[in-house]
């Protein structure tokens, strides 16, 4: 067993699983009297955020809604607490890996598309979870209107039996929030946004359906639908929606291409209207997803879970060779100044203004740095 990193109440933090701008997630051990022990995932908010900050309020909202959720395809919250300036929530620990681990390219390999039956297995589980989440009601029977807003390969955990679970409701919106996200505010991973989310428009569950369609595309292609590049360019492509020519390159039956295009349609009324409708279409097109597909998926997850840490391998394989500092260019200065994906809490108009200002400042700095002869 790994050496403890930190102890929070009865939770012993053992190993960092992942980190972001707001919090870090750890593999932890929940301890109790008479030798009781159970693994948990503990999400620990960075202590820099003050008690009254918006980030802390969002974290508390995430814990509150997570405690309401109870479904085999959703990672719920089992505990919440505060120790001095440390806010934390405990969740079910999933022994496995996320979908991104199975498909993302590495330093020594190309992107790895999933077999169709395995990809369908993941997405049918995710859609079953979304169907439940979108229908959750409060104590008075009123819909909470939950929209996850961040369905993507990074937020889909798969256990060693091949069962997929939706995690990370950190930017989810709905009636449970103390304050709602204003129109024009963009939050989430731009590579998996519906057109209306990329445009900062009001959202409902159909936005999650589009994100699920984009995730299915990534699972079958090994890469995100809108490619890479600076955030504003990817955001613009997301706002336009997935193009038919992009789907044509997928190695899959035409029926699957049609399903992806319907799920990601730019016109929200032409999309699948519910997660169940999407799931039923996919299950009918890939009838062996829950047999052969789940068996394939379980084997892939087991192998990936036994592999060395991707973070450690990446550091070893991409260590820079010492050398002279290259002369800066406008593009390199801009790329270092540009905020990276995901976008969180910026209006699109503000983001574009800031991007233009950064570009202009980079060009001016480059011109000043150039050796001008008399």
Image: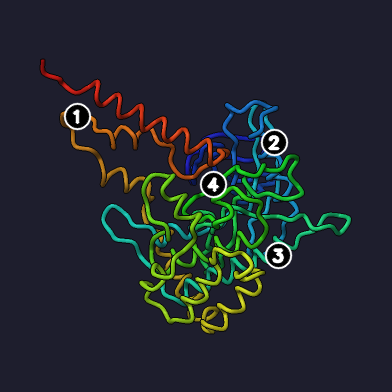
Of badges 4 and 1, the one in the foreground is: 1
Q: Calculate the distance from the C-alpha at mark 4 to the C-alpha at mark 2.
A: 24 Å
N-terminal of the two: label 3 or label 4?
Answer: 4
Instruction: Measure how far apart labels 3 and 1 are at the Cα level.
Output: 54 Å
Q: Quadrant of the C terminus?
A: top left
Sequence-earlier tag: 2 or 3: 2
Query: Furthest residue to the front?
Result: 374
Which residue does the numbered mark 3 point to in the structure image? 132
Q: Residue at x 65, y 63 (%)?
A: 130
Residue 50: mark: none
Give the image location of residue 133, x and y in percent: 70, 60
**Under tag 2, what secondary structure?**
helix
The residue that disc 1 covers is: 327
In three-dimensional space, the C-alpha distance between marks 2 and 3, rounded to whole angstroms, equals 25 Å
Q: Work out whether mark 3 precedes mark 1 in sequence or the reverse, and give the earlier one.
A: 3
Q: Is residue 321 left or right of residue 47?
A: left
Q: Position of residue 111 (x, y in %)?
A: 34, 61
Marks 4 and 1 in Cβ contact (< 8 Å): no
Q: Tag on residue 27?
A: 4
Nearer the observer: mark 2 or 1; the answer is 1
Instruction: Identify which residue, 77 or 60, lies in the foreground.
Output: 60
Q: Which residue is mark 2?
A: 57
* Mark 1 residue crowding within 10 angstroms, few (<14) / some (14–19) / many (20+): few
Q: Earlier in the sequence, mark 4 or mark 2?
A: 4
Mark 2 Cα shell of 10 Å, populated few (<14), some (14-19), many (≥20): some
Report the residue that reaches farthest toward the right: 140
Tell me if residue 357 comes above or below residue 113 in the rendering.
above
247 is higher (above) or lower (below) than 84? below
């Amino acid at each position: 067993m790994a050496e403890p990193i930190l102890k929070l109440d009865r939770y012993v933090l053992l190993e960092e699983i992942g980190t972001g701008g707001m919090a870090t997630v750890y593999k932890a051990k929940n301890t109790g009297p008479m030798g009781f022990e159970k693994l948990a995932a503990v999400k620990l908010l960075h202590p820099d955020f003050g008690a009254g900050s918006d980030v802390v309020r969002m974290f508390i909202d995430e814990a509150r809604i997570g405690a309401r959720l109870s479904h085999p395809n959703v990672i719920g919250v089992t505990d919440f607490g505060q120790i001095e300036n440390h806010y934390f929530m405990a969740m079910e620990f999933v022994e496995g890996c996320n979908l991104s681990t199975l498909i993302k390219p590495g330093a020594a390999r190309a992107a790895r598309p999933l077999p169709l039956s395995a990809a369908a297995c993941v997405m049918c589980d995710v859609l079953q979870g979304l169907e439940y989440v979108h229908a959750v009601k409060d104590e008075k029977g009123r819909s909470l209107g939950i929209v996850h807003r961040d369905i993507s390969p990074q937020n889909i955990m798969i256990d060693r039996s091949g069962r997929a679970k939706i995690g990370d409701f950190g930017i989810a919106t709905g009636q449970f929030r103390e304050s709602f996200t204003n129109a024009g505010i963009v939050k989430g991973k731009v590579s998996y946004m519906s057109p209306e989310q990329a445009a900062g428009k009001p959202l409902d569950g159909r936005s999650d359906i589009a994100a699920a369609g984009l995730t299915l595309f990534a699972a079958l292609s090994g890469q995100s639908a809108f490619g890479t590049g600076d955030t504003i360019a990817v955001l613009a492509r997301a706002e336009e929606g997935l193009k038919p020519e992009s789907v044509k390159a997928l190695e899959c039956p035409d029926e699957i291409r049609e399903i992806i295009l319907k799920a990601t349609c730019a016109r929200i009324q032409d999309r699948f209207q519910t997660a169940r409708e999407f799931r039923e279409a996919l299950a009918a097109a890939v009838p062996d997803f829950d047999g052969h597909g789940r068996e394939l998926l379980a084997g892939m997850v087991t192998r990936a879970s036994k592999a060395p840490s991707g973070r450690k391998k990446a550091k070893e394989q991409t260590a820079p060779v010492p050398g002279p500092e290259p002369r800066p260019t406008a593009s390199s200065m801009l790329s270092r100044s540009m905020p990276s994906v995901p976008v969180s809490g910026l209006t699109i108009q503000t983001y574009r203004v800031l991007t233009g200002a950064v570009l202009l400042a980079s060009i001016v700095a480059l011109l000043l740095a150039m050796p001008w002869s008399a």
